[in-house]
């Protein structure tokens, strides 16, 4: 439930705080106003829905874990304290409101989706593999699942993969220009084994989500976009459907009779010296691999994170968007903003996904066919 | 009277302090009515502006890029706030100080890779030998510990600063 609440709050942050300014105010609108405050001025209801959905997720985390960020509630062997009835009831009481806001946003997005047809066609629209966790039977899994990899026509490239075997399937490589490693699907090699994870990939690999309202939305999504949508622009749409799904699963979990059971922790010891854990983080598959000594002190760690899985695809998307929107040597701000917006579709960690900064200086070299530099633009 | 100019910047931190800032929820809109946000994760400004009244700094100083930015921030900021344990003590980023950057880079980019083992460079900012708290590099005016500081605390600090009061954080803050 903690993970699902995290997905709700994180998706709300991505969609409302970071991407809705582009979608609502326009990719070409004045950058000085193209932010959440600008959105709040133009459509206060949309901005309020965003704040409320994020708060809904964050409050669940706070009620379960004691604080909203870095709660130390999940411990080896379980969790550190049980849920009490009043907390459960408070969360349950907030669900109808969150559900309504999530559906309202989804309707708004669907009504407007036709106006972003050009972006959808050039924001990383290419075939690739997709990877995500599924339960036996094919429902999307957010924890306790097995890895499945499909290609862009739905061909299953790997299925039922125990996360412990991740390194038989996934390779990691270093590019000299980034601290972020890239992963690839080993059987296809590098760089042909390019794959995507996260909301778009999860909806592609799963047969269904497993809650009725979200599955109805998923059916409509597939009617509109096909069974295996390949444009990264659709991460937004997928994210909104996942918010609906996660809220309904939280509701289900809270309604289970054993949810208040005080037996929440086994006293774990050092049973093994090595372990791998996998879950679906908001941005996609998250792999933690640890080796510890006999006292439990960590000696070696490898983390394979969603943004690393998506790195090859993000770079390819940037190239596609830049090629389409930047023509000749005249470059407008809105074109460069689209190059950043395609990265925001993947919602990588905040420094890259936001408009943060000289933290993300964007430089575009425009060269002719021979490779000589015509112009250099930066923002 | 024009509104105070507020900036936020994220150096070597996990973004949790910025997340906590967003946890002010609706109070965020109240704050944005009272200040001009001139730089930070939620506005699309690429260069750190001049003449900033308050800058909240998240994270430690770990790379050459952090160093360049913190000097620029200090030069252009009246009240510089170290926000969160990473900025105040170097916290998690500081855990690498006993090991040194060379061993860490080797483990990540030479050992734990399948193909193309190599150290990233020269286009990426070099790591400094030590990850240091902000006040070890430039003068800091207000310290707000916490990992992260709670949204309520950030709100009260901002409220004080915007109203021209000196925020008192002793006694109401703690590390972690
Ligand atoms: S103080 Fe804590 S929350 Fe803030 S950046 Fe550091 S690790 Fe993250």
Image (spheres, coloured by chain):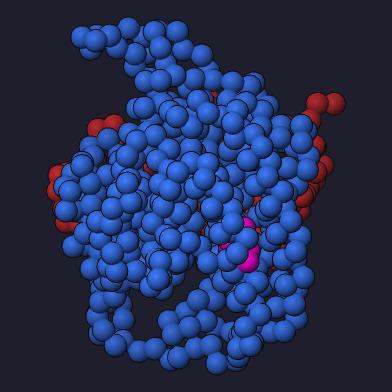
User: Foreground: B42 or B75?
Assistant: B42
**For this view, does B3 lie left or right of residue B145?**
right
Magenta range is A244-248
> Which lettered chain is shown in red?
B
User: Foreground: B2 or A224?
Assistant: A224
Q: Is residue A247 magenta?
A: yes
Residue sitting at 16 percent across and 47 percent down?
A: A189
User: Foreground: A228 or A199?
Assistant: A228
Query: Residue A298 appears at what percent x and percent y?
Result: 30, 73
In this view, A315 is above or below B21: above
Colour assignment, chain A:
blue
In this view, B160 is above or below A63: above
Query: Residue B5 appears at what percent x and percent y?
Result: 70, 32
| Residue B46 visible within the image | yes
In this view, B125 is above or below A165: above
- Number of numbered labels in the structure image: 0
Query: Magenta region, mostly helix, strand or loop?
Result: helix
Residue sitting at 54 percent across and 53 percent down?
A: A218
Query: Residue A305 appears at what percent x and percent y?
Result: 36, 55
Q: Is residue A257 magenta?
A: no
Query: Residue B3 appears at what percent x and percent y?
Result: 79, 30
Residue sitting at 75 percent across and 64 percent down?
A: A96
In this view, A172 is above or below B32: below
**For this view, does A228 lie left or right of residue B145?**
left
Residue sitting at 45 percent across and 8 percent down?
A: A330
Q: Residue B175's image quarter?
A: bottom right
Q: Quadrant of the N terminus of chain B?
A: top right
Q: Quadrant of the C terminus of chain B?
A: bottom right
Q: Residue A134's image quarter?
A: bottom left
């Amino acid at each position: 439930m903690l993970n699902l609440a995290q997905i709700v709050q994180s998706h709300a942050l991505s969609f409302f705080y970071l991407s809705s300014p582009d979608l609502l105010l326009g990719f070409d609108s004045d950058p000085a106003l193209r932010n959440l405050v600008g959105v709040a001025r133009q459509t206060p209801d949309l901005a309020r829905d965003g704040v409320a959905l994020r708060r809904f997720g964050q409050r669940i985390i706070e009620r379960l874990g004691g604080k909203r960020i870095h709660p130390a509630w999940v411990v080896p062997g379980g969790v550190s304290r049980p849920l009490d009835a009043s907390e459960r009831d408070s969360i349950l009481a907030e669900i109808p409101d969150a559900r309504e806001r999530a559906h309202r946003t989804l309707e708004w997005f669907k009504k407007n989706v036709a106006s972003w047809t050009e972006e959808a066609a050039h924001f990383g629209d290419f075939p690739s593999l997709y990877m995500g966790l599924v339960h036996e039977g094919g429902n999307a899994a957010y924890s306790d699942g097995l890895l499945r990899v499909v290609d862009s026509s739905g061909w299953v490239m790997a299925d039922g993969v125990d996360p412990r075997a991740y390194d038989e399937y996934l390779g990691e490589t270093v590019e000299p220009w980034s601290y972020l490693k890239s992963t690839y699907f080993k059987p296809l090699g590098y760089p042909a084994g390019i794959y995507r994870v996260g909301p778009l990939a999860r909806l592609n690999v799963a047969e269904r989500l497993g809650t009725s309202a979200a599955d109805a939305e998923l059916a409509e999504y597939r009617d509109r976009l096909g069974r295996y949508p390949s444009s990264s622009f659709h991460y937004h749409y997928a994210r909104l459907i996942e918010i609906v799904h996660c809220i309904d699963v939280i509701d289900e979990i809270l309604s289970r009779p054993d949810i208040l059971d005080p037996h929440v922790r086994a006293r774990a010891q050092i049973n093994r010296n090595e372990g791998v854990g996998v879950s679906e983080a908001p941005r996609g598959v998250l792999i933690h691999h640890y080796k510890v000594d006999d006292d439990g002190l960590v000696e070696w760690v490898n983390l394979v994170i969603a943004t690393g899985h998506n790195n090859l695809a993000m770079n390819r998307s940037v190239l596609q968007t830049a090629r389409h929107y930047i023509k000749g040597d005249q470059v407008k701000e809105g074109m460069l903003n689209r190059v950043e917006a395609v990265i925001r579709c993947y919602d990588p960690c905040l420094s890259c996904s936001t408009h943060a900064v000289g933290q993300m200086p964007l430089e575009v070299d425009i060269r002719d066919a021979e490779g000589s530099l015509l112009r250099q633009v930066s923002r | 009277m024009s509104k105070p100019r507020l900036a936020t910047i994220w150096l070597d931190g996990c973004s949790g302090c910025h997340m906590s800032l967003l946890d002010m929820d609706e109070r965020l809109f109240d704050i944005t009515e009272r200040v001009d946000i001139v730089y930070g994760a939620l506005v699309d400004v690429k260069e750190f502006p001049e003449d900033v009244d308050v800058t909240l700094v998240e994270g430690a100083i770990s790379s050459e890029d952090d160093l360049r930015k913190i000097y620029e921030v200090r030069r252009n900021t009246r009240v510089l706030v170290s926000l969160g344990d990473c900025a105040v003590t170097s916290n998690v980023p500081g855990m690498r100080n006993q090991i040194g950057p060379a061993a860490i880079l080797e483990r990540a980019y030479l050992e734990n890779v399948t193909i193309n083992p190599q150290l990233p460079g020269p286009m990426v900012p070099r790591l400094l030998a030590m990850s240091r708290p902000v006040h070890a590099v430039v003068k800091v005016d207000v310290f707000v510990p916490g990992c992260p500081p709670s949204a309520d605390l950030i709100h009260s600090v901002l409220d004080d600063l915007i109203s021209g009061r000196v925020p008192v954080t002793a006694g109401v803050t703690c590390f972690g």
